[in-house]
Structure formats: structure tokens, C-alpha cells
């Protein structure tokens, strides 16, 4: 369908919400540890999604099969990546984190080729994968690779963020096999389980709130309420209204916004390697989107 102004507004809002999340993590790290950030962010997002379930007059499923899947996706699609990305941002800039996290669709492409019979790589998709991960290789760089023996924090931080991106990809592919449910219900159930899993860290984070600087507290509210809860609802709305092809533009715009915001707010350095990597990753995503096979809508 033809995108209307409200769809473009929703798309740009998602770009701002998700692209700004990396900057918000930088501010949150000034007051909380990575696990605490993940726990509090997930708890706030779960609350927003549960309110959305109630407002939409939906119901959480009662069968054990749904909740078993919710548990698996909660670990691999929420708790682990939220923690890994927050941990990784202790050693890299927010803009660089946004570029690395943009590799999620490339990981998804590779996993789908291995695990799904109807998602085999074609020549152009293989080229997209090579181009995108060439950008990742540029980011890691020879200097970072040389630091392995010395335990260089920057390399391990980059690898942690890549691992978080890979977790998102695993969750995306796994969602194809989940029992059917309304997407907001699925997201709320997954987030609720993740919040319970991370509740010890979340509780510790809540206890620290009275002594938390206002900038870090505002960043955490943004991450949980807007960047996690509200953004999930907006994403499902956009998918339902416009389809996967229009929504896929998020993959190009989110890392660009993350880089620009990091530069404007924190004056993060724009290294040539980061700009080259961004160009390669975006090229890979472009080739992937314009491959011969039309994009398939994902369930769940």
C-alpha cells in the first residue's frame, strides 16, 4: 500500500526512538551497571506493553506452550542483548554501537539460510552479507585485533554488541516457529518473562533511583517507556499498516541517526573507519532489501 503521512511520521518516530537509545544508554551508564540498565529498561517496557494489552482488550495466553516460547525469546531476544549492548557501550561510542547493532538483519539472513527451507541465500543476498560484514570487519580493525592478547576493552566491547545483534537475529528466526498470537500480546508476554528474569538487577536499580542524576534517570525513562514499550507498539502498527518493505527502511536510518546524535550531543569522533563501515553495512542492507526474492512477513 501507499505510505501516508502518518506512516512516515511513525517511521521517523521509530528512527528517533531506536536511534537515540544508544545515546540514552551512555547517560544511563553514568548511574547504573549494565545488568541494572537492562533490568529496569525491560521492566518499564513490560509495564507499557501490559497496559497496551489491557487497552486493546487482549488477553495473555494460558497455555504452557506459549509461555515456554516466551521464556526462550525473553532470554535470547531481550535479557541477553539488552545486557550485552549496555556492557559493550562501556568501551565504545554510542554511534559505533548503533552501526554494530545494525548488523542484526545480516545475522538474520545467514541464520534463515541455515535453518529455514524457504529462506535460502541467493547470489545478491550473499553479496549483501559479504558487504555488510566487511563493514563490521573494518570496525574491528587491525588495531583492535592486535589488542586481543592484551585484553583490549574496545575489541571486547565491539564483540559484545555484535553478540547482542546476533541474539536479536536468533530471536527473529525463532519467532517463525512460535504458536500464533497477537503481536502485542506476544511482545508483552516475552517482556513480562524477561522482567521477571531480570528482577534482581531491576530491584537493585530501583533502590539507586533517589541518588540518580536527573540526566541518567530521564535517559532510563526514555529507554524503557519510549524506546522499548512505546516503540514496540509503534513498530507493530507500522508493520500492519504498511508491510515489511516500508518498515525495513528503519535498518538504514537508525544507525545514521545514532551516529549523528552521538556527534551532536557528546561530540563523539567521526573516524574514517566508522564512516566506511557505516557505508558498507548500509550497502549490504540495501542489497538485501532489493534482492530478487520479495521480503516475507514474519509471524509473531
Image: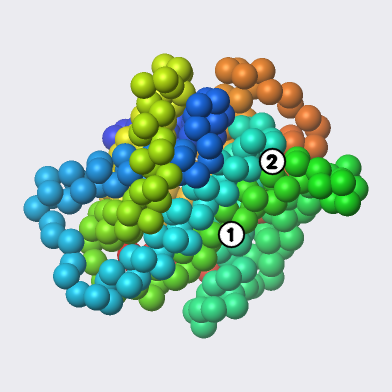
Say which residue appears at 88% left-offset and 42% top-offset.
143
Relative image position of residue 282 (x, y in whole percent):
64, 46
Per the image, the residue denoted by label 1 is 166
Q: Earlier in the sequence, mark 1 or mark 2?
A: 1
Between residue 88 and residue 1, name the one nearer to us: 88
Label at residue 106: none
Relative image position of residue 247 (x, y in whole percent):
42, 48
Per the image, the residue denoted by label 2 is 278
Relative image position of residue 98 (x, y in whole percent):
59, 39
Residue 242 visible in the snapshot: no
Per the model, the C-alpha gap separating discs 1 and 2 is 18 Å
Relative to 268, residue 89 above or below: below
Relative image position of residue 75 (x, y in whole percent):
44, 61
Q: How many marks?
A: 2
Quadrant (top left/top right/bottom left/bottom right) for the C terminus: bottom left
Q: Is mark 2 on a helix, strand or loop?
A: helix
Q: How crowded is mark 1: few (under 14 residues within 10 Å), some or many (20 or more)?
A: many
Say which residue appears at 47% left-offset and 50% top-offset.
248
Say which residue appears at 78% left-offset and 30% top-offset.
271
Q: Which residue lies furthest to the bottom in this view?
A: 117
Relative to 77, residue 227 above or below: above
Between residue 205 and residue 23, name the one nearer to us: 205
Q: Residues within 10 Å of mark 2 (few under 14, many from 20)?
A: many
Residue 87 visible in the snapshot: yes
- Tell us which disc is closer to us: 1 or 2: 1
Amino acid at each position: 500500500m501507499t505510505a501516508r503521512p502518518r506512516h512516515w511520521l511513525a517511521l521517523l518516530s521509530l528512527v528517533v526512538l531506536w536511534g537515540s537509545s544508544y545515546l540514552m544508554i551512555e547517560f544511563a551508564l553514568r548511574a547504573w551497571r549494565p545488568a541494572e540498565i537492562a533490568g529496569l529498561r525491560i521492566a518499564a517496557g513490560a509495564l507499557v506493553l501490559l497496559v497496551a494489552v489491557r487497552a486493546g482488550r487482549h488477553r495473555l495466553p494460558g497455555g504452557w506452550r506459549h509461555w515456554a516460547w516466551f521464556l526462550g525469546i525473553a532470554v535470547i531476544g531481550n535479557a541477553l542483548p539488552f545486557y550485552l549492548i549496555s556492557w559493550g557501550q562501556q568501551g565504545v561510542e554510542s554511534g559505533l554501537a548503533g552501526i554494530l547493532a545494525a548488523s542484526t538483519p545480516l545475522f538474520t539472513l545467514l541464520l534463515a539460510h541455515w535453518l529455514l527451507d524457504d529462506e535460502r541465500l541467493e547470489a545478491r543476498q550473499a553479496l549483501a552479507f559479504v558487504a555488510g560484514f566487511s563493514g563490521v570487519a573494518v570496525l574491528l580493525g587491525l588495531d583492535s585485533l592486535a589488542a586481543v592478547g592484551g585484553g583490549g576493552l574496545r575489541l571486547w566491547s565491539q564483540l559484545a554488541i555484535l553478540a547482542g545483534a546476533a541474539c536479536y537475529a536468533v530471536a527473529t528466526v525463532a519467532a517463525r516457529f512460535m504458536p500464533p498470537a497477537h503481536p502485542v500480546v506476544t511482545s508483552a508476554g516475552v517482556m513480562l518473562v524477561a522482567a521477571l528474569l531480570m528482577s534482581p538487577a531491576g530491584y537493585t536499580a530501583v533502590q539507586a533511583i533517589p541518588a540518580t542524576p536527573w540526566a541518567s534517570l530521564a535517559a532510563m525513562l526514555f529507554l524503557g517507556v519510549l524506546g522499548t514499550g512505546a516503540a514496540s507498539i509503534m513498530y507493530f502498527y507500522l508493520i500492519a499498516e504498511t508491510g515489511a518493505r516500508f518498515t525495513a527502511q528503519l535498518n538504514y536510518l537508525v544507525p545514521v541517526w545514532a551516529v549523528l546524535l552521538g556527534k551532536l550531543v557528546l561530540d563523539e569522533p567521526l573516524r574514517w573507519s566508522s564512516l566506511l563501515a557505516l557505508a558498507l553495512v548500509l550497502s549490504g542492507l540495501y542489497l538485501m532489501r532489493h534482492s530478487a526474492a520479495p521480503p516475507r512477513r514474519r509471524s509473531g
